[in-house]
Amino acid sequence: MKILTLNINSIRAHIESFMDILRSGEYDVIMVQELKVETANFPHTVFDEFGYNIKVFGQKSWNGVAIFSKYSIEDTVMGLPTYPDVNARFIECVVDGRVRLINTYMPNGDTVESAKFPYKLEWMREFTKYIEQYLNSPEPVIIGGDFNVAIEDRDVWAPRNYVGIAIAAPEAREIMNQWLNTGWVDAWRALHPDDIGYTWYGYRGRDTIANKQGLRLDYFLCNKVATEMIKNCEIDMSPRLADKPTDHCGLMLELK
């Protein structure tokens, strides 16, 4: 099973490049974030020809998450169950009757002085409580998505430029490290312990990709059972290199 997580930064704005991914048939499951469209207005019919089952938790103009799967999709949960939230940031399901996926678009938080920053931390802490039940689960559980946290300085192209920015804030990093310290495995880092790899490159400025001016914000976290199934995890640059690109690369996880 090959799984892709991708922040599409508006499914409507980047629908052609996204359809190229579907058309390739490379991925069995695609976890999409930042749809920026209401559930009722999601363009399901456009994707009918590709044969994916689709579950959508959308929101007008902001946020929104979806799961595309060549396999069955069951036991779907929309919205973080422990945290009432007007924002569409969480969708959970079981694919193929055997792998539980949590697709999340975590809050950005802006700056540490912003009113959005306490919301970011509160959301992440509630998420921490929720995922505790799955760490030692007998079923494989995989959390994927845009976490909006660069967990280490080496995940930031110029750390000095991100002092006071929420995605590199010590408080947010501490929460993510708590997940790893309890046993969740960062799949890409586990296979690339010494590498620099970015999943986001901004639109501003020229040659941000060539100059390696990026951030690692997208992750797959695996529980203990899922960790034993990891075959490969690589950054897929193609969505960022498309003619009309999103600002994120894809992240691919292949299971044994």
Image (tube, rainbow, N blue to C red):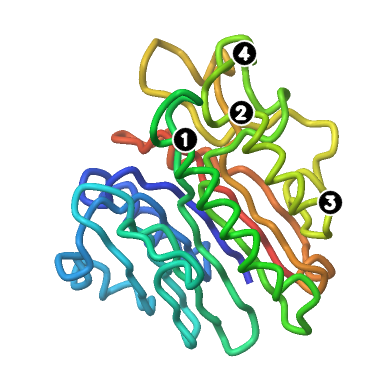
Label 4 sits on residue: 158
Q: Amino acid at mark 1?
A: Phe
Q: Residue at x 61, y 28 (%)?
A: 169
Q: Secondary structure at mark 2?
A: loop
Q: Which mark is residue 117?
A: 1
Mark in the foreground, 2 or 4? 2
From the top left corner, tell me how far across and down residue 253 is, in percent.
65, 58
Q: Secondary structure at mark 3?
A: helix
Mark 3 touches mark 2? (CB < 8 Å) = no
Q: Secondary structure at mark 1?
A: helix
Q: Residue at x 52, y 62 (%)?
A: 26
From the top left corner, tell me how far across and down residue 120 is, in percent.
49, 43
Label 2 sits on residue: 169
Question: Real-space Cα distance between discs 2 and 1?
Answer: 10 Å
Q: Is residue 216 above or below residue 228?
A: above
Label 3 sits on residue: 181
